[in-house]
Amino acid sequence: MARALPSCVKIYLNGEIVSRGEARIDPFDRGFVFGDGVYEGLRAFDGRVVGLSGHVARLASGLAATGIPWDASLLGGVCERLLEANSLRDAFIYMQCTRGAPGPGEPVRSRVAAGPIRPTIFAYATPTPGLNTYAATPTKRAITTPDTRWLRGLIKSISLMGSVLAAYEAEAAGCDDAILIRTMPGGEKLAAEGTSANLIAVVPAPDGTQIVTPPLDGAPILAGVTRDILLAAAARRGVEIAVRNLPEHELLAAREIMLCGTLTMVTAITHLNGKPVGEGAPGPETNRLLRVLVEAIGQGA
């Protein structure tokens, strides 16, 4: 988990490193008024950003899809500056690119900007646990809830109301997270992902069990960089993970359920909708996949 921001945190804003108290963002910025922007969340261990090329590619894709003009290749340099400015080695880094604020005399509520405007680029870094703290698998309790988010899951939009409301629903149920269930046009209900992390489950199969993760174009879901690292590392280790749709009924019968993400790493869901998953503790495949991920990151993924 990311820790609270220290009061003396240094942030990145439009090319400059400034203190939080010095930062000035136009209240008419389209990110604030419309949620018109994209973001990235990255993790650094021992001063090195994990999966940087994947994050750059995903940010570039989101910027292109939304028409926000910023060079995603600058992301690595921003991360380096933030880590140095805040004297951090292990950190979570958040980067947000909005379309910017309209100029004087330009309409504030127009859905389409009056003309080219300067994007607002904001980022911060906050301390997180080091890689050596993942000897034991983290755990969470979760609920299932309908996925009411928009359909363009490949755009990492800063507008997260659907996920926020699902997270509040989970908290009200005494849980830590929610697994989102998308009802498809034909009526089939598919498990998608958590509120901020991808989903993996170990489900019964004719010859025992199968490890499954939903595809990007199924529910749909976010293209998780940590998920990509884990899938590649697992394949190298001979661990087969099937990328296929995961119907809700299979999720509810799963022997193990886990979430995978930048902050989540591999976290076991020990209870779902108030019932234990498997033995109600991290299962063998969950523990193994966490070890695979930690090893891959330690080797430079």
Image (spheres, rainbow, N blue to C red):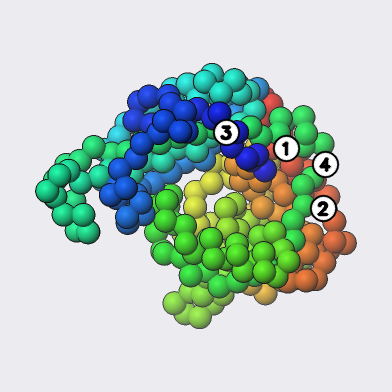
Q: Is residue 160 left or right of residue 275?
A: left
The answer to whether the residue labelled 4 contacts the one labelled 1, judged by CB atoms less than 8 Å apart, is: no
Q: Is residue 162 left or right of residue 274?
A: left
Give the CA separation, mark 2 to mark 1: 15 Å
- Which numbered dot is residue 38? none
**Residue situated in front as seen by the camera: 186 or 159:** 159
Identify the residue shown where x is 83% and y is 41%: 136
Q: Give, as a three-letter code, the residue at label 2.
A: Pro
Residue located beneath label 3 in the image: 7
Q: Give, as a three-letter code, the residue at label 1.
A: Val
Mark closer to the chain start, 3 or 2: 3
Mark closer to the chain start, 4 or 3: 3
- Label 2: how many residues lie within 10 Å, few (<14), some (14-19) or many (20+)? many
Residue 127 in the image, given as x and y percentages of width and height: 63, 32
Identify the residue shown where x is 54% and y is 46%: 224
Q: Quadrant of the C terminus?
A: top right
Give the CA separation, mark 4 to mark 1: 13 Å
Residue 94 in the image, given as x and y percentages of width and height: 50, 38
Residue located beneath label 2 in the image: 282
- Which numbered dot is residue 292? 1
Give the CA separation, mark 3 to mark 2: 36 Å
The answer to whether the residue labelled 2 contacts the one labelled 4, judged by CB atoms less than 8 Å apart, is: no
Q: Give, as a three-letter code, the residue at label 3.
A: Ser
Mark closer to the chain start, 3 or 1: 3
Q: Is residue 15 left or right of residue 270?
A: left
Residue 137 in the image, given as x and y percentages of width and height: 79, 45
Residue 20 in the image, given as x and y percentages of width and height: 47, 33
Q: For residue 58, what is the image quadrant? A: top left
Q: Secondary structure at mark 4?
A: loop
Select label 2 or label 1 by which is in front. Answer: 2
Residue located beneath label 4 in the image: 136
Q: Quadrant of the N terminus?
A: top right
